[in-house]
Amino acid sequence: MKYEVGVNYWGSKYGIDMWKYWDEESVARDLKELAKWNVKYMRVFPNWRDFQPIVNIYKQNGEYKETLFEDDKPLDNIYGLDMEKIAHFDRFCDLCEENGIKIVVAIVTGWMSGRHYVPHALQGKNQMNNFESLAWMTRYVKGFVKFLKHKKAIHAWDMGNESNNMGHEASRYEAINWTYTIVNAIKSEDQTRKIYSGMHALQVEDQSWSHWLIQDQAEWCDMLTPHPYPSPTVGGHLEAMTKLRTTMVPTAQVELYSSIGGKPAQIQEQGTFTTLYGTEEQSALFMQVNLWSGWANGSTGYFWWMAHDTQRNNPPYEWILMENELGMLRTDYSPKPVAQTMKRVYDEISSLPCADLPDRIKDTCFIIGERMNAYQYLVSSAYVLAKQAGLEPTFRYSTQTIPEYPLYIIASDEFWQLVRKSTYNEILRRVKEDGASLLITAHDAALLNLYEAFGFVSKGAPMDNSTHIAEFNGDKFPFRYGKKFLIESIGAEVLARDESDGTPVLTKFKYGKGYTYFLNCPLEKMLVENVDYINKYPYYKIYKTAGENILKTKPAYTQNPDIAVTVHPINEKEFYAVVINYVDEERPCDVKWAEGATVTPIKGDGKTVAGCDSAIFKVKLK
């Protein structure tokens, strides 16, 4: 099975200090116990501080004299490596191989859980742009790979643990240069293994507060690595961990990374912070749904954070409380429900005839405009609405080449520079000439071609932050304008109106061979600001209407808003369908199959799907 399933690992006895106080007996037992629970892969962390223990020595007037090892020992290699630590890691690789575990090595582990772990000589320096730091970091990486690349247990190199936390880069180009430096230091010694990014919270466009972009990491790395916790960093904090908007966010983030970057992505870290966020049983359900969803939606793997509960009270765990109880195993090696879940789900997937699942069909493309809040509006709202509607979404940034899809959505458009004019015109051309559809959910951005392409005129745009009611297909739902566009139809069909004054809220217009839809409301933004709305009101039906031409010919799609279906073609007449329930309560399977299709259950009875679980079918078309 290609799906990489495992954990992030620090030793159970000494944690982050496992290399400082190497205890082979303890580590060997750790690995033996983890292997029992189907841990096939581990992401591991050579602590940079311990593997390159260098100090700078100064003479009179504070002038630099030389660099030595700690305790004033002369350097015995040009890399500044502690060769005893290298020997320990060599032995660690042997132990992993003995237990059937492959490892992803996060080489530059200079930051972990809120603390810097850098060599003494480099403390206090900006690790992103300080030339001394970059020089020693490059030597360290090059030497580490040189001395350990022969170990069979090493599956891939990872640049480091969230290394974008090791310093403040001044520009996008400093972030690119750091990445380029580390990647090429690895490749100078080993060109046979893939290189994983190891970064978290990458952006779609350059921000004043973050210059680390998905596209730039994809240029230099082979694997992109979102770390989707139930965290506001990625929009995963809006509901309980076993509810739709939290369980679906990791899948959405994998799709964001892989579609924008054009490289594979995987859920490289996932945990639950603290038991205050939910019980151990809920954590297991959170893992279960994400194991299945990642597998079905293109993630190349799933790594839990972390292998063991933290025992020690040294920093950073003296500073924080939230990451002390995240292990799969307790301090006495007894398994938590997440360990049992990992073993069971891995066994289930491995036994399937479709364990190596074909790629799924995608049909809806979100166009990410400039200054758009991709994580909050798109990942935690738009993606969820699309899945609820039975659509299969992907993403593109407006400056990228946009592939051809039946439906395009520009969600909660903001500010003047929404998308490139050439992109906008090309999408409208595809609607007019090729029969595609376009949905825009409006906040306050400027649009072109209103008369021709949307069939309405606007007679003003006052601000209006109050809540209004509209009726759509028999359902009443609250909404708020961004700017209230005072539109009047000159050919557009008005599908919903503001009950207070009749202002069109949702319009549909036949434009050439296709259709344009305009929602006079920043729906996705509103659903972030009003968290309960998405569960109280069927907003997904707006997306469903925009995608009605897709659903007419789709071989399988959900009719239950808590369930999503992915379609994986085997050949022209056969496909696998994976049905996933994204909430923690049983739901009717409720899939609409193509007329005349023969549906054979592989997993599940086809009637219901258990909470945070899956059902799988092989389908043959008539």
Image: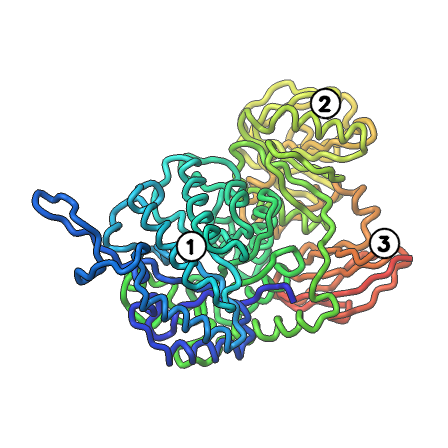
> Mark 1 = which residue?
160
On residue 112, the disc is: none
Mark 3 is surrounded, within 10 Å at the Cα level, by few (under 14), some (14 to 19) or many (20 or more) other residues, namely few
Q: CA distance from mark 2 to mark 1?
A: 53 Å
Q: Mark 2 vs mark 1: which is more N-terminal? A: 1
**Farthest residue in the left direction?**
60
> Mark 3 = which residue?
572
Residue in view at x 75 percent, y 27 percent: 429
Q: Mark 3 vs mark 2: which is more N-terminal? A: 2
Q: CA distance from mark 3 to mark 2?
A: 42 Å
Q: Mark 3 vs mark 1: which is more N-terminal? A: 1
On residue 456, the disc is: 2
Residue in view at x 54 percent, y 32 percent: 370
Task: Between residue 472 and residue 581, name the one nearer to us.
Answer: 581
Looking at numbered disc 1 in the image, what kind of residue is underneath it?
A: Gly
Task: Between residue 267 and residue 175, name the one nearer to us.
Answer: 175
Q: Is residue 571 above or below residue 398?
A: below
At which x and y percent is residue 468? 60, 36
- In the structure shown, which secondary structural element does the residue marked by tag 2 occupy? strand
